[in-house]
Image (spheres, grey):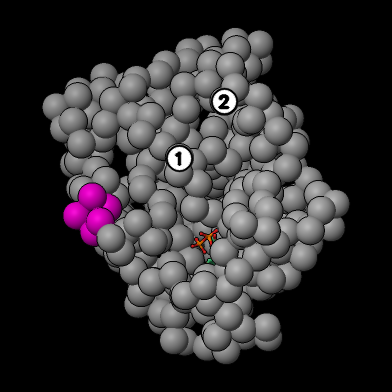
């Protein structure tokens, strides 16, 4: 099998590649990774290359290129003629998307358009797309969210992802692309292997920020405590990144069996955790107090996002196995120590 993986040097992409290479389908496969390393890391590619060699992957290629380079993308797609594309690449921060909507449109929507136009003229008929819970309408208060619930993103990041979902649905209808869209809830934790984890610069995500060191003059900031939730802070559904990775491995089997169509799956745990609950759990996990201040709400943040992942369980036979809070926090904390050592080198 020939795979084209965009954003394979990033957080979720690298975890997927680690799982895929270790899976039965990994052996003998040919893998092409494109990543401009604006959010990804060459260190992950180095580790994956070694793992691929050990596990008998037939070919492993990496191009440090942007998906905005239309000529390059078109040529690569034509030359590789992949069986399946995993499209992880994109900008991922809700707060930044509100401040820089054009940057987000270019990197999340324009790139997908370039990739799809290139694919239309190849034999590739399988596409797996990384979408988000941010596509749902935040004012809709029925939780957990099911895939058919009303859409209406409250920030440019969510809008971008929804636009790409629509483009893919069109491609499925017009030229028979087989599409699996995964709406991730909050990706969290790190590979139990200790080789990959969350590494964003600057870091904006809750768990790595909670696990950083604070003191009474530099406290963790809770964004708003006046939401109508059980303790006033936002509720999210934290799903271990290894569980997200395993869903993608299942998607390959699913697309092979069904050939065409367009299916959306939520990936989450059905469990909501508030910011303060996570702060307390992190404090127990690392054995130290986490001093905090409540500050203003972050623009674009919906109050509650919790997934019903029943559809993925029923159709893909997927279920989260690593998403227990302690395991998420423990693997994330272990990775933070590895990351600190990498950054010191
Ligand atoms: N959050 C916070 N302080 C921070 C970072 C995040 O209170 O320094 C909150 C944020 O407002 C949201 C939740 O933690 O309610 C998860 O945020 P994150 O950025 O990790 O993921 P998102 O839900 O935006 O995808």
Query: In this rendering, is residue 23 above or below 209?
Result: above
Q: Which mark is residue 81?
A: none
Give the main secondary structure, helix, strand or loop, of the magenta stretch.
helix
Q: Confirm whether the magenta stretch covers residue 280.
A: no
Q: Position of residue 330 (x, y in %)?
A: 78, 46
- The secondary element bearing badge 2 is classed as helix
Cα separation, mark 1 vs mark 2, equals 12 Å
Residue at the (47%, 27%) spot, across then down: 41
Residue at the (45%, 60%) spot, across then down: 132
Q: Upstream in the sequence, badge 1 or badge 2?
A: 1
- Mark 2 = which residue? 343
Q: Position of residue 230 (x, y in %)?
A: 68, 86
Query: In this rendering, is residue 65 above or below 15?
Result: above
Viewer-side residue, 185 vs 298? 298
Q: Is mark 2 within 8 Å of ligand 1?
A: no
Q: Counting other residues with Cα less than 10 Å from the Cα at mark 2, is it few (<14), some (14-19), or many (20 or more)? A: few
Q: Position of residue 108 (x, y in %)?
A: 29, 50
- Mark 1 = which residue? 201
Outermost residue toward the left in this view: 71
The range drawn in magenta is 100-104
Q: Counting other residues with Cα less than 10 Å from the Cα at mark 1, is it few (<14), some (14-19), or many (20 or more)? A: few
Viewer-side residue, 243 vs 228? 228
Q: Quadrant of residue 79?
A: top left
Image side of residue 43 versus residue 280, left or right: left
| Quadrant holding the C terminus | top right
- The image shows a total of numbered marks equal to 2
Residues marked 1 and 2 touching at CB (< 8 Å): no
Residue at the (16%, 32%) spot, across then down: 70
Outermost residue toward the front in this view: 217
Residue at the (41%, 79%) spot, across then down: 137
Is residue 243 visible to us here?
A: no
Q: Position of residue 117 (x, y in %)?
A: 18, 41
């Amino acid at each position: 099998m020939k795979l084209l993986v965009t954003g394979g040097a990033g957080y979720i992409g690298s975890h997927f590649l680690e799982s895929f290479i270790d899976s039965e389908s990994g052996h003998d496969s040919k893998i092409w990774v494109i990543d401009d390393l604006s959010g990804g890391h060459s260190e992950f590619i180095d580790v994956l290359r070694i793992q691929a060699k050990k596990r008998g992957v037939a070919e492993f290629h990496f191009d440090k290129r942007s998906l905005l380079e239309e000529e390059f993308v078109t040529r690569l797609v034509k030359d590789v003629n992949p069986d399946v594309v995993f499209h992880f690449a994109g900008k991922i921060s809700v707060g930044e998307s509100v401040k820089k909507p054009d940057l987000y449109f270019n990197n999340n929507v324009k790139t997908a358009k370039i990739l799809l136009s290139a694919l239309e003229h190849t034999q590739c008929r399988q596409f797996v797309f990384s979408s988000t819970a941010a596509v749902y309408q935040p004012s809709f208060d029925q939780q957990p969210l099911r895939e058919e619930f009303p859409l209406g993103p409250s920030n440019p990041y969510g809008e971008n992802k929804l636009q790409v979902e629509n483009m893919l649905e069109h491609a499925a209808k017009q030229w028979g692309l087989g599409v699996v869209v995964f709406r991730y809830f909050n990706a969290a934790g790190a590979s139990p292997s200790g080789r990959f984890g969350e590494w964003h610069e600057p870091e904006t995500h809750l768990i790595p920020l909670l696990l950083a060191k604070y003191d009474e003059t530099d406290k963790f900031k809770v964004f708003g405590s006046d939401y109508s939730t059980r303790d006033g802070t936002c509720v999210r559904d934290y799903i271990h990144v290894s569980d997200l990775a395993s869903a993608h491995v299942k998607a390959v089997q699913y697309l092979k069996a069904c050939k065409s169509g367009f299916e959306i799956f939520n990936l989450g745990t059905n469990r909501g955790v508030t910011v303060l609950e996570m702060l307390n759990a992190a404090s127990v996990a690392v054995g130290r107090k986490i001093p905090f201040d409540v500050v203003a709400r972050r623009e674009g943040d919906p109050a509650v996002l919790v997934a019903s992942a029943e559809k993925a369980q029923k159709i893909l036979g997927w279920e989260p196995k690593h998403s227990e809070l302690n395991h998420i926090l423990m693997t994330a904390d272990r990775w933070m120590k590895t990351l600190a050592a990498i950054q010191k080198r």
